[in-house]
């Protein structure tokens, strides 16, 4: 009976009176090409959740030169990922930054702050981990609003 209501549109007519439109949106999952057991992004309504992004170049290898160049490449990869899922750096609400060495916090910040206007800085959590995938120096994940 429920399936018939969904097929003929009555289910949506009934539920939209009680639930905001975003609540009716099913999550859209965007798995990566690597076959890993997580999605690169998930979009629910106007919200985009991005998995951690590394400073890998087009060849899939981490860029050389340490925290500075890796942070630049990470932020560029983040920009590209957001754009491919209907958002942008201007619409980031929250970032999580993971460093391989907390002593590189200031160097990472010098690059990071160039990607966001001073009056639109996302909320952020930063911490250090013992090690990052591929030996990366930095990983960034974020939550953003999709552009309508």
Image (cartoon, rainbow, N blue to C red):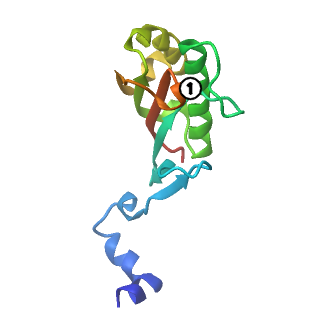
From this view, report whether residue 82 is shown above or below residue 65: below
Question: How far across and down, in percent of the image, does residue 146 sit?
Answer: 51, 45
From this view, report whether residue 34 is shown above or below residue 115: below
From this view, report whether residue 131 is shown above or below residue 18: above
CA neighbours of label 1 inside 10 A, class few (<14), some (14 to 19), many (20+) = many
Question: How far across and down, in percent of the image, does residue 141 sit?
Answer: 45, 34
The image quarter in which residue 75 lies: top right
**Residue at 30 percent of width and 64 percent of height:** 19
Question: Looking at this view, is 89 or 77 the one in front?
Answer: 77
Question: How far across and down, in percent of the image, does residue 51 sit?
Answer: 47, 41
Does 130 sit left or right of 50 as displayed? left
- Quarter of the image where the N terminus is located: bottom left
In the picture as drawn, the residue positioned furthest to the left comes out as 18
In the picture as drawn, the residue positioned furthest to the right comes out as 59
**Residue at 41 percent of width and 15 percent of height:** 101
Does 46 sit left or right of 77 as displayed? left
Count of marks placed on residues: 1
Local secondary structure at mark 1: helix
**Residue at 44 percent of width and 11 percent of height:** 104
Does 84 sit left or right of 138 as displayed? right
**Residue at 48 percent of width and 28 percent of height:** 139
Question: How far across and down, in percent of the image, does residue 133 sit?
Answer: 49, 32
The image quarter in which residue 26 lies: bottom left
Q: Which residue is mark 1?
A: 75
């Amino acid at each position: 009976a429920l399936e018939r209501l969904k097929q003929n549109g009555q289910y949506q007519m009934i539920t939209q009176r009680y639930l905001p439109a975003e609540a009716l949106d099913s999550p859209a999952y965007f798995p990566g090409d690597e076959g890993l057991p997580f999605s690169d992004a998930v979009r629910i309504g106007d919200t985009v959740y991005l998995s951690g992004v590394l400073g890998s170049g087009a060849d899939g290898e981490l860029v050389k030169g340490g925290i500075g160049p890796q942070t630049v490449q990470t932020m560029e990869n983040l920009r590209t990922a957001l754009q491919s899922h209907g958002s942008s750096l201007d619409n980031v609400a929250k970032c999580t930054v993971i460093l391989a060495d907390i002593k590189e916090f200031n160097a990472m910040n010098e690059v990071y702050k160039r990607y966001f206007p001073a009056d639109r800085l996302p909320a952020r959590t930063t911490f250090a981990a013992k090690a990052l995938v591929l030996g990366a120096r930095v990983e960034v994940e974020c939550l953003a609003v999709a552009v309508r």
